[in-house]
Amino acid sequence: MGTTGLIMKFLSSAKLDKIALDLYERLPLAFRHRFIYGSPFLYWKAFLQESQGWDKKRIQEYQIERLKDLLRHAKNSIPYYKKLFADYGFDPERVQTIDDIRVLPYLNKETVRDRLEEFIISSVPRKSLLMKPTSGSSGIPLTVYKTKESQKIFTAFWDDLLVRIECMPMSKIMMFWSVIELGKQKDLPFLRYGNRLIFSNKHLTDDYMAECLRLIGKFEPEFIFGFPNTLTVFSAFIKKNGYRPFRNLKAVIAHSETLYPWQRNLLKEVFGVRIFTIYVMTEFVVFAGECENSENIHMYPQYGLAEFKDFDSGHEEIVATGFTNYAMPLIRYQTGDIVIKGGELCHTCGRHHQLIDRIEGRINDFLINKEGRVIPRIMPAVKIFPHTKQYQFLQEEPGKAGLRIVRADSYSEADTLYIKSKLSEIFGPMSKTIDIEIEFVDSIPQTPAGKLNLVDQRLDIRKFLAIRS
């Protein structure tokens, strides 16, 4: 039977996993980095430290070399790009500047989804790759394949960014997570091991959040991680009940969704600490986060190449080419994320990184009015409505949208009148070009990743943009 088999007779797999996690948390940091994360993590950590002070010229030289290497690889090993480059007469060896790839077409999510097999490296056994689905928050879920090396590189970027705000691997961290599993136990409500306390973002009832606060009071986290919408619901509950258990808290990290200004203000008010945002994508094309000295959002030039495509009214869509995932490279990939672009130098820290002044949301976070026009700047202005637990816009035809609301016990007809007047104020003159119908529901479905989209947009926004142009 062997030693392991004998232990398994007396301990459940869940207990073994819990013990393993606890032991992992106690390992010295140097041991973790070298023997668990491995050499790719160590090399990239050192590289990120060295390259953060590069000037614009040095960054461009690096990006061109990485881009050429990626293009060579795509031509030789990725079926989709073999054919695409041949069709366009494109030769990676002739690339001299970043602008040279602009002869290639943009890549959209539909193409990747419908022709997935053509994007995966042909020279590596599929079983040696890691597979991860995207959240589907754009309405088009994808399956992304990656190498173990690319995952370790991602961890190096994540660690580098968090070090800016002194969030170390040994720090006490509380987080909301989509699915909590331990051994054969699935969808656990919470998990505690070592310096980690994890809650589910699928169980946000009043009783559950009250229990979370009780456990947090004992745990006393230094950092809190979560999706912005989850953190908003949780902080609204804290504010309503006047609870303040955060004596040692240093920062709240919001990730994977757009953090709107009103949400940031609410989180600051409730938690009383710095609110720090991280912008990453499962597709391994973009990695960005706030500066340690300001709210400037830095895009890591070492992670990928960012382009900006005109969207509407001064907004631009990020188009990205990732440098770190050779198992499934995406070139000139339309991310669907809408931003207002900043400069290329952060004056507060001195890094020559592309800055984003504001992330406005995903392309499907916008509504279409009766004239087929995109209504801009609506989503960042929408605030949490009184006596509501959750809400979401739903649009299936131009000029009409539903507002689905999960009511709190204290909700009244006066709140409905207030919401209608508030919507008229937010939409301004555009209020005459779109009809909003309020619908009360018991719950609003989350994405598979546990996110709650602000808009369930069933229309193809890009088609309306094409009509306007």
Image: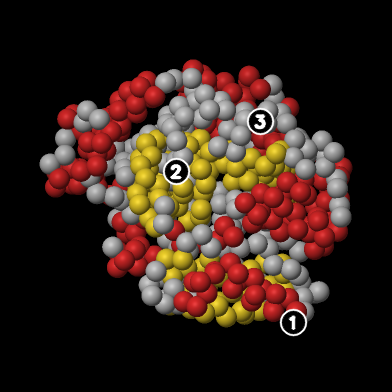
Q: Which mark is residue 165?
A: 3
The amino acid on which the numbered mark 2 sits, given as a three-letter code, is: Lys
Q: Which residue is mark 2?
A: 341
Look at the image and tell me in which quarter the C terminus lies. Answer: bottom left
Q: Residues within 10 Å of mark 2 (few under 14, many from 20)?
A: some
Q: Which mark is residue 413?
A: 1
Residue 347 position in % (x across, y down): 53, 28
- Element type at marker 3? loop
Residue 263 position in % (x across, y down): 66, 53
The amino acid on which the numbered mark 1 sits, given as a three-letter code, is: Glu
Is 441 placed above or below 333 here?
A: below
The amino acid on which the numbered mark 3 sits, given as a three-letter code, is: Ile
- Element type at marker 2? strand
Q: Closer to the N terminus: mark 1 or mark 3?
A: 3
Q: Which mark is residue 262?
A: none
Q: Image quarter for residue 203?
A: bottom right
Residue 253 position in % (x across, y down): 65, 42
Judged by depth in the image, the label closer to the viewer, 1 or 3, is: 1
Q: Give me the residue at 68% from left, 28% from top.
A: 166
273 on left or right of 29: right
CA–CA distance between discs 1 and 3? 45 Å
Q: Closer to the N terminus: mark 1 or mark 2?
A: 2
Is 135 placed above or below 34 here?
A: below
Is 409 placed above or below 224 here?
A: below
Pointer 3 with pointer 2, Cβ within 8 A: no
